[in-house]
Amino acid sequence: MYRQSRLCRVLGNPLTFAVVQILAKNGEMSPSQIAAVVGRSVSRVSNVLAALRLAEVVRYQTEGRKARYRLKHPRETRKLLAVLCTFVKSASAVRR
C-alpha cells in the first residue's frame, strides 16, 4: 500500500499531474519542452520529473547532455488518468 499512497501523493500536486497528462498525450519530451507547455521554469519541471522518477512513473534517456522523458507504463497511466477524470466528474455531479 505504501507505493500506491506515494503515487497518490505525487499526483496530488497540480503541476505534477499536468506533467503526467502532457507526457501521456505527447509521448517523449525534454524538460524544456514540458516547461514551455506548463509555463513553469525548467528547474521546477526537473524537480517534478525527479519526483516522478522516484515514484517510478517516468523514465528518461540521455543523449549527450539532453534528457528525454516518457511514461514508464503509458497504457496503465492513461487508464489511471481516465479513471481519475471520471471519478472527479462523478463526484462533482453528486455534490450538486
Image (tube, rainbow, N blue to C red):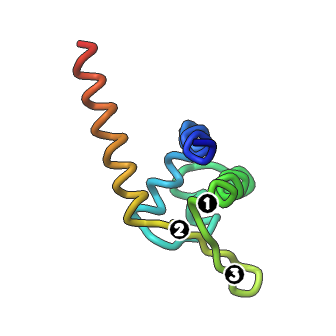
Q: Nearer the viewer, mark 1 or mark 3?
A: 1
- Type of amino acid under label 3: Thr
Which disc, if any, is residue 44? none
Q: Residue 53's quadrant in the figure?
A: bottom right
- Give the crowd class for mark 3: few <14, some 14-19, many >=20 residues within 10 Å: few
Residue, x 30% and y 24% (percent of image)?
91
- Type of amino acid under label 1: Glu
Cα distance in 3D space between marks 2 and 3: 15 Å
Residue, x 33% and y 40% (percent of image)?
85
Residue 15 in sight: no
Cα distance in 3D space between marks 1 and 2: 7 Å
Residue denoted by label 2: 72
Q: Position of residue 94 (x, y in %)?
A: 24, 18
Residue denoted by label 3: 62
SS at circle 3: strand
Q: Nearer the viewer, mark 2 or mark 3?
A: 2
Q: Position of residue 47 (x, y in %)?
A: 72, 52
Relative horizontal placement of residue 88, taking residue 26 as reference (left or right): left
Q: Position of residue 8 (x, y in %)?
A: 54, 40
SS at circle 1: loop
Residue 9 in sight: yes
Q: Going by the picture, which residue comes out furthest to the front?
A: 1
Relative horizontal placement of residue 77, taking residue 1 as reference (left or right): left
Residue denoted by label 1: 56
Tell me whether circle 1 and circle 2 mark residues in contact (CB < 8 Å): yes
- Type of amino acid under label 2: Lys
